[in-house]
Image (cartoon, rainbow, N blue to C red):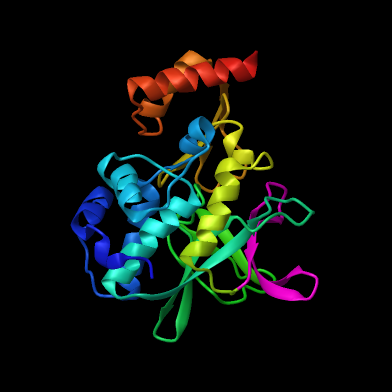
Amino acid sequence: MWHGEQLDLEAYLGRLGYEGERAPTLETLRGLHRAHVLSVRWDNLDSFLYRSVSLDLADLQDKLVRRDRGGYCYEQATLYAAALERLGFRFTALSGRVQMGAEKILPATHAMLLVDLDGRRWLSDIGFGASPLAPIELVDGGDGDEVTIEGRAFLLRRTEITPGADGWALYEPDGRGGWMVRHNFTENPQYPVDYQLGNHFIATSDHSPFNRRPFLQRIRPDRTDQLDGLNWTTTAAGSAEPDEKRTVEPHELPKLLSDTFGVELSAEEAELLVERMRQLEG
Protein backbone atom coordinates (compact mmCIF):
# COMPACT_ATOMS: atom_id res chain seq x y z
CA MET A 1 0.00 0.00 0.00
CA TRP A 2 2.80 2.42 0.96
CA HIS A 3 5.18 1.10 -1.72
CA GLY A 4 7.76 -0.07 0.78
CA GLU A 5 9.21 -2.35 -1.90
CA GLN A 6 10.19 0.77 -3.88
CA LEU A 7 12.03 2.37 -0.98
CA ASP A 8 15.82 2.56 -1.02
CA LEU A 9 16.00 1.34 2.57
CA GLU A 10 19.77 1.58 2.84
CA ALA A 11 19.71 5.22 1.75
CA TYR A 12 16.89 6.04 4.17
CA LEU A 13 18.60 4.41 7.14
CA GLY A 14 21.86 6.08 6.16
CA ARG A 15 20.08 9.44 6.11
CA LEU A 16 18.96 8.77 9.69
CA GLY A 17 22.33 7.46 10.79
CA TYR A 18 20.50 4.38 12.03
CA GLU A 19 22.63 1.25 12.49
CA GLY A 20 20.43 -0.76 14.86
CA GLU A 21 18.36 -3.90 14.50
CA ARG A 22 15.87 -4.22 11.65
CA ALA A 23 13.47 -6.80 13.01
CA PRO A 24 9.95 -5.36 13.57
CA THR A 25 10.29 -5.00 17.34
CA LEU A 26 9.65 -2.23 19.86
CA GLU A 27 13.39 -1.64 20.17
CA THR A 28 13.66 -1.12 16.41
CA LEU A 29 10.61 1.14 16.34
CA ARG A 30 12.01 3.31 19.12
CA GLY A 31 15.35 3.58 17.39
CA LEU A 32 13.87 4.46 14.00
CA HIS A 33 11.39 6.92 15.49
CA ARG A 34 14.06 8.83 17.41
CA ALA A 35 16.52 8.84 14.52
CA HIS A 36 13.89 10.14 12.10
CA VAL A 37 12.72 12.97 14.37
CA LEU A 38 16.28 14.13 15.06
CA SER A 39 17.40 13.85 11.42
CA VAL A 40 14.51 15.00 9.21
CA ARG A 41 13.53 18.59 9.86
CA TRP A 42 10.00 19.90 9.65
CA ASP A 43 9.47 22.63 7.07
CA ASN A 44 6.82 23.95 4.71
CA LEU A 45 9.17 25.60 2.22
CA ASP A 46 7.73 23.92 -0.87
CA SER A 47 4.15 24.83 0.02
CA PHE A 48 5.20 28.41 0.82
CA LEU A 49 7.38 28.95 -2.24
CA TYR A 50 5.54 26.88 -4.85
CA ARG A 51 2.15 25.79 -3.40
CA SER A 52 3.03 22.33 -4.65
CA VAL A 53 4.11 19.30 -2.56
CA SER A 54 4.49 15.81 -4.00
CA LEU A 55 3.80 12.66 -1.99
CA ASP A 56 5.16 10.38 -4.71
CA LEU A 57 7.66 8.09 -2.98
CA ALA A 58 10.36 8.70 -5.59
CA ASP A 59 10.03 12.45 -5.06
CA LEU A 60 10.10 12.05 -1.27
CA GLN A 61 13.24 9.92 -1.44
CA ASP A 62 14.92 12.50 -3.64
CA LYS A 63 13.93 15.41 -1.42
CA LEU A 64 14.08 14.04 2.14
CA VAL A 65 16.78 11.40 1.69
CA ARG A 66 19.12 12.28 -1.17
CA ARG A 67 18.91 16.09 -0.92
CA ASP A 68 18.82 16.07 2.90
CA ARG A 69 15.82 18.40 2.97
CA GLY A 70 12.89 18.55 5.37
CA GLY A 71 9.14 18.41 4.86
CA TYR A 72 5.86 18.50 6.71
CA CYS A 73 3.83 15.70 8.23
CA TYR A 74 2.30 14.20 5.08
CA GLU A 75 5.69 13.92 3.43
CA GLN A 76 7.43 12.54 6.48
CA ALA A 77 4.67 10.08 7.44
CA THR A 78 4.46 8.73 3.88
CA LEU A 79 8.21 8.09 3.74
CA TYR A 80 8.23 6.63 7.26
CA ALA A 81 5.26 4.38 6.43
CA ALA A 82 7.15 2.98 3.43
CA ALA A 83 10.12 2.21 5.68
CA LEU A 84 8.01 0.50 8.36
CA GLU A 85 6.18 -1.50 5.70
CA ARG A 86 9.48 -2.59 4.16
CA LEU A 87 10.73 -3.72 7.59
CA GLY A 88 7.60 -5.77 8.29
CA PHE A 89 5.80 -3.62 10.85
CA ARG A 90 2.00 -3.68 11.14
CA PHE A 91 0.51 -0.22 11.45
CA THR A 92 -2.45 2.01 10.72
CA ALA A 93 -2.10 5.49 9.27
CA LEU A 94 -4.13 8.09 11.17
CA SER A 95 -5.19 11.70 10.75
CA GLY A 96 -5.44 14.23 13.57
CA ARG A 97 -6.59 17.77 14.28
CA VAL A 98 -3.84 20.08 15.53
CA GLN A 99 -5.34 22.18 18.33
CA MET A 100 -2.50 23.85 20.30
CA GLY A 101 -5.10 25.16 22.73
CA ALA A 102 -7.69 26.23 20.14
CA GLU A 103 -11.32 25.77 21.18
CA LYS A 104 -12.90 25.45 17.71
CA ILE A 105 -12.88 22.33 15.56
CA LEU A 106 -9.99 22.50 13.11
CA PRO A 107 -9.49 20.36 9.98
CA ALA A 108 -7.91 16.93 10.34
CA THR A 109 -4.63 17.70 8.59
CA HIS A 110 -1.97 16.00 10.70
CA ALA A 111 -0.55 12.60 9.66
CA MET A 112 0.81 10.00 12.08
CA LEU A 113 1.06 6.22 12.46
CA LEU A 114 -0.28 3.75 15.01
CA VAL A 115 1.98 0.69 15.22
CA ASP A 116 0.80 -2.72 16.47
CA LEU A 117 3.38 -4.76 18.40
CA ASP A 118 2.65 -7.87 20.47
CA GLY A 119 -0.86 -6.79 21.41
CA ARG A 120 0.16 -3.23 22.30
CA ARG A 121 -0.29 -0.14 20.17
CA TRP A 122 2.16 2.73 19.85
CA LEU A 123 1.55 6.22 18.50
CA SER A 124 4.54 6.99 16.29
CA ASP A 125 4.18 10.68 15.45
CA ILE A 126 7.38 11.65 13.64
CA GLY A 127 6.07 14.55 11.56
CA PHE A 128 4.91 17.17 14.05
CA GLY A 129 8.14 19.16 14.12
CA ALA A 130 8.68 19.15 17.86
CA SER A 131 7.65 15.51 17.87
CA PRO A 132 8.12 13.22 20.86
CA LEU A 133 11.49 11.48 20.63
CA ALA A 134 9.86 8.08 21.16
CA PRO A 135 6.57 6.36 20.37
CA ILE A 136 3.88 6.70 23.05
CA GLU A 137 1.79 3.68 23.99
CA LEU A 138 -1.89 4.17 23.23
CA VAL A 139 -3.25 3.86 26.75
CA ASP A 140 -5.34 6.36 28.70
CA GLY A 141 -3.07 8.44 30.94
CA GLY A 142 -5.98 9.34 33.23
CA ASP A 143 -5.70 12.48 35.32
CA GLY A 144 -1.96 12.63 35.74
CA ASP A 145 -0.09 9.60 34.41
CA GLU A 146 2.16 11.60 32.12
CA VAL A 147 4.94 10.27 29.91
CA THR A 148 8.28 12.07 30.04
CA ILE A 149 10.55 11.53 27.05
CA GLU A 150 14.04 13.01 27.36
CA GLY A 151 12.80 15.86 29.54
CA ARG A 152 9.62 16.56 27.55
CA ALA A 153 6.27 15.71 29.14
CA PHE A 154 3.19 14.40 27.32
CA LEU A 155 -0.18 13.06 28.39
CA LEU A 156 -2.48 10.86 26.30
CA ARG A 157 -6.20 10.67 27.12
CA ARG A 158 -9.37 9.29 25.63
CA THR A 159 -11.68 12.13 24.71
CA GLU A 160 -14.62 13.23 22.58
CA ILE A 161 -13.15 14.68 19.39
CA THR A 162 -16.37 16.00 17.87
CA PRO A 163 -19.93 15.53 19.14
CA GLY A 164 -20.56 11.80 19.19
CA ALA A 165 -17.08 10.85 17.96
CA ASP A 166 -14.64 9.48 20.53
CA GLY A 167 -10.90 9.38 20.07
CA TRP A 168 -7.68 10.45 21.72
CA ALA A 169 -5.96 13.71 22.64
CA LEU A 170 -2.24 14.22 23.11
CA TYR A 171 -1.47 16.95 25.63
CA GLU A 172 1.63 18.99 26.38
CA PRO A 173 2.31 21.42 29.28
CA ASP A 174 0.63 24.80 28.79
CA GLY A 175 3.22 26.82 30.73
CA ARG A 176 0.77 27.61 33.53
CA GLY A 177 0.92 24.35 35.44
CA GLY A 178 -1.75 22.64 33.34
CA TRP A 179 -2.09 20.80 30.05
CA MET A 180 -2.93 21.92 26.50
CA VAL A 181 -4.21 19.72 23.69
CA ARG A 182 -1.47 19.40 21.09
CA HIS A 183 -3.62 17.39 18.70
CA ASN A 184 -6.49 14.92 18.80
CA PHE A 185 -7.31 11.99 16.55
CA THR A 186 -9.58 9.01 16.00
CA GLU A 187 -8.50 5.49 15.09
CA ASN A 188 -10.18 5.64 11.66
CA PRO A 189 -7.68 4.18 9.16
CA GLN A 190 -6.24 6.53 6.58
CA TYR A 191 -4.88 5.51 3.20
CA PRO A 192 -2.46 7.15 0.77
CA VAL A 193 -5.34 8.74 -1.12
CA ASP A 194 -6.55 10.34 2.14
CA TYR A 195 -3.12 11.81 2.74
CA GLN A 196 -3.13 13.12 -0.83
CA LEU A 197 -6.35 14.99 -0.11
CA GLY A 198 -5.06 16.55 3.12
CA ASN A 199 -1.76 17.39 1.47
CA HIS A 200 -3.52 19.19 -1.37
CA PHE A 201 -5.43 21.37 1.12
CA ILE A 202 -2.31 22.22 3.14
CA ALA A 203 -0.22 23.04 0.06
CA THR A 204 -2.76 24.97 -2.00
CA SER A 205 -5.74 26.25 -0.02
CA ASP A 206 -6.12 29.92 0.86
CA HIS A 207 -7.29 28.66 4.26
CA SER A 208 -4.05 26.78 4.95
CA PRO A 209 -1.61 28.43 7.38
CA PHE A 210 1.34 26.64 5.78
CA ASN A 211 1.51 28.39 2.42
CA ARG A 212 1.42 31.94 3.81
CA ARG A 213 4.82 32.13 5.51
CA PRO A 214 7.86 29.90 6.09
CA PHE A 215 7.68 27.67 9.13
CA LEU A 216 10.51 25.38 10.25
CA GLN A 217 11.23 23.33 13.35
CA ARG A 218 14.30 21.39 14.37
CA ILE A 219 14.34 19.35 17.53
CA ARG A 220 17.52 18.30 19.31
CA PRO A 221 17.80 16.35 22.56
CA ASP A 222 18.38 19.55 24.52
CA ARG A 223 16.36 22.17 22.63
CA THR A 224 13.94 22.99 19.82
CA ASP A 225 14.49 25.77 17.29
CA GLN A 226 11.48 27.19 15.49
CA LEU A 227 11.15 29.75 12.71
CA ASP A 228 7.71 31.30 12.15
CA GLY A 229 7.99 33.85 9.38
CA LEU A 230 10.85 36.04 10.57
CA ASN A 231 10.51 35.09 14.25
CA TRP A 232 13.12 32.62 15.51
CA THR A 233 12.74 31.02 18.94
CA THR A 234 14.80 28.51 20.89
CA THR A 235 13.15 26.46 23.64
CA ALA A 236 15.01 24.20 26.06
CA ALA A 237 13.80 20.62 26.47
CA GLY A 238 11.16 20.52 29.20
CA SER A 239 10.34 24.23 28.95
CA ALA A 240 6.89 25.37 27.82
CA GLU A 241 8.07 28.86 26.86
CA PRO A 242 10.94 29.95 24.57
CA ASP A 243 14.23 30.80 26.22
CA GLU A 244 15.29 33.04 23.35
CA LYS A 245 13.27 35.11 20.87
CA ARG A 246 14.80 36.90 17.89
CA THR A 247 13.52 38.65 14.77
CA VAL A 248 15.61 38.24 11.63
CA GLU A 249 15.74 40.14 8.35
CA PRO A 250 14.71 38.46 5.08
CA HIS A 251 18.26 38.44 3.74
CA GLU A 252 19.42 36.53 6.85
CA LEU A 253 17.10 33.59 6.23
CA PRO A 254 19.26 31.41 3.94
CA LYS A 255 22.19 31.46 6.38
CA LEU A 256 19.89 30.86 9.37
CA LEU A 257 18.29 27.90 7.62
CA SER A 258 21.71 26.44 6.88
CA ASP A 259 23.40 27.10 10.23
CA THR A 260 20.51 26.36 12.62
CA PHE A 261 18.04 24.16 10.76
CA GLY A 262 20.42 22.23 8.51
CA VAL A 263 18.50 23.21 5.38
CA GLU A 264 20.69 24.03 2.40
CA LEU A 265 18.83 26.01 -0.26
CA SER A 266 19.91 26.32 -3.86
CA ALA A 267 20.83 29.82 -5.00
CA GLU A 268 17.49 30.07 -6.82
CA GLU A 269 15.50 28.93 -3.77
CA ALA A 270 17.37 31.32 -1.48
CA GLU A 271 16.69 34.24 -3.82
CA LEU A 272 13.02 33.32 -4.12
CA LEU A 273 12.61 32.96 -0.34
CA VAL A 274 14.17 36.38 0.35
CA GLU A 275 12.07 37.99 -2.36
CA ARG A 276 8.82 36.45 -1.05
CA MET A 277 9.54 37.57 2.49
CA ARG A 278 10.33 41.12 1.37
CA GLN A 279 7.01 41.14 -0.50
CA LEU A 280 5.19 40.03 2.65
CA GLU A 281 6.90 42.73 4.70
CA GLY A 282 5.99 45.38 2.16
Tell me which corner region of the image, top left, top right, bottom left or bottom right, holds residue 164.
Answer: bottom right
The image position of residue 224, as x and y in percent, is: 48, 41
Q: Quadrant of residue 24?
A: bottom left
Q: What residue appears at the point 47 percent right and 35 percent down from the top-left corner?
A: 45
- Magenta: predominant secondary structure element? strand
**Whether residue 225 can be seen here:** no
Q: Residue at x 34, y 75 (%)?
A: 89
Q: Which residues are magenta?
A: 159-186
| Quadrant that contains the C terminus | top right
State the residue in front, 190 or 132. Answer: 190
Q: Residue at x 30, y 52 (%)?
A: 58
Find residue 235 and report its horizontal and vertical position in percent: 53, 38
Taking the magenta stretch, the answer to whether it contains residue 167 is yes
Instruction: Left or right? Give the position of 141 relative to 30.
Output: right
- Whether residue 150 is in magenta: the answer is no
Residue 87: image location, x then y, percent = 27, 71
Q: Position of residue 1 (x, y in %)?
A: 38, 70
